[in-house]
Amino acid sequence: MNKKFWISIIIIILQLALALYISSFIADDAKIPSHWNIKGEIDDYTGKWTAVFLFSGINLFLLLFMIALPLFSVRYKKTPERFSQMVPTITNIVIFFFAVIHIFTLLIGAELVSYTSSFIYYIIGLMFILLGNILPKMPSSFFIGIRTPWTLSSDYVWRKTHKVGGICFIISGLLMLFIPAIWGNNSTASTIMFILVLVFIFYSILYSFLLFKKEGKQ
């Protein structure tokens, strides 16, 4: 196992330990937020113990999947050095931010903090920015990255798309940070931010198609 995965293991252990500690402040019949709509409003809840263990389990499953990736990923074997650098890094980032969101939802359930949609936007925005810096370095993969029929069929299209996609992710992350900070928590700001983020993500997909068509003509 790659030594870098130990960071994720430590994060998950701390996540579960904190979750169990916070659960002592949560009533057995409390409702814990489990889903948000595009406006940042909580639109679904789950029970106390489901919230404690399920979300920790999701991170654990993600970690095990990434550790096992070399066993079933054909493209991993083509560039093992690059994959061994990038996969643990991406895993550590995603698991960390998922753990932060998990602990935040439990704190809401324990009524130790007040809910604000801006916090969720800030966390996801920061994650997008970090992933945007990593995407251009990610080798072609069926499991990680901007996986379209056009990027998977051409290494050139994959590289170019992920350079553009990285920029789109960073811009999307910045939008999640600044729009709520400037316009506050209201449905108009959330809707505009959501539309703009979708535009940038869709553009990276469209770019891969246009680049593929251009490469085919050449």
Image: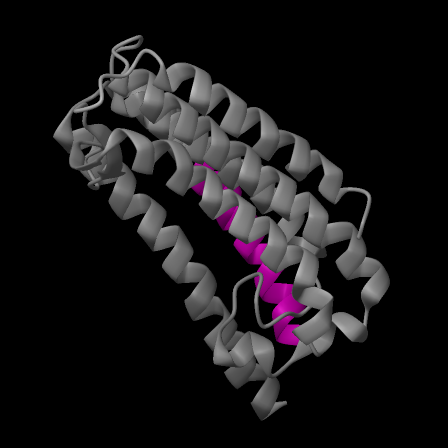
From this view, report whether residue 163 is shown above or below residue 127: below
Looking at the image, which is closer to me, 32 or 184? 32
From this view, report whether residue 195 is shown above or below residue 30: below
Q: From the viewer's perspective, is 74 left or right of 111? A: right
Tell me how many marks there are.
0
Looking at the image, which is closer to me, 165 or 110? 110
* Quarter of the image with the C terminus in it: bottom right
Residue at point 58%, 44% (across, down): 131
Residue at point 19%, 41% (across, down): 37
Looking at the image, which is closer to me, 205 or 134? 134
Q: Is residue 174 visible?
A: no
**Magenta stretch, overall SS:** helix
Q: Position of residue 58 (x, y in %)?
A: 46, 47
Q: Is residue 135 visible?
A: yes
Q: Which residues are magenta?
A: 156-174
Q: Position of residue 172 (x, y in %)?
A: 43, 41
Residue at point 61%, 54% (across, down): 64
User: For residue 81, which quarter of the picture?
Assistant: bottom right
Q: Position of residue 139 (x, y in %)?
A: 71, 65
Q: Position of residue 204 (x, y in %)?
A: 47, 61
Q: Is residue 158 magenta?
A: yes
Q: Is residue 187 magenta?
A: no
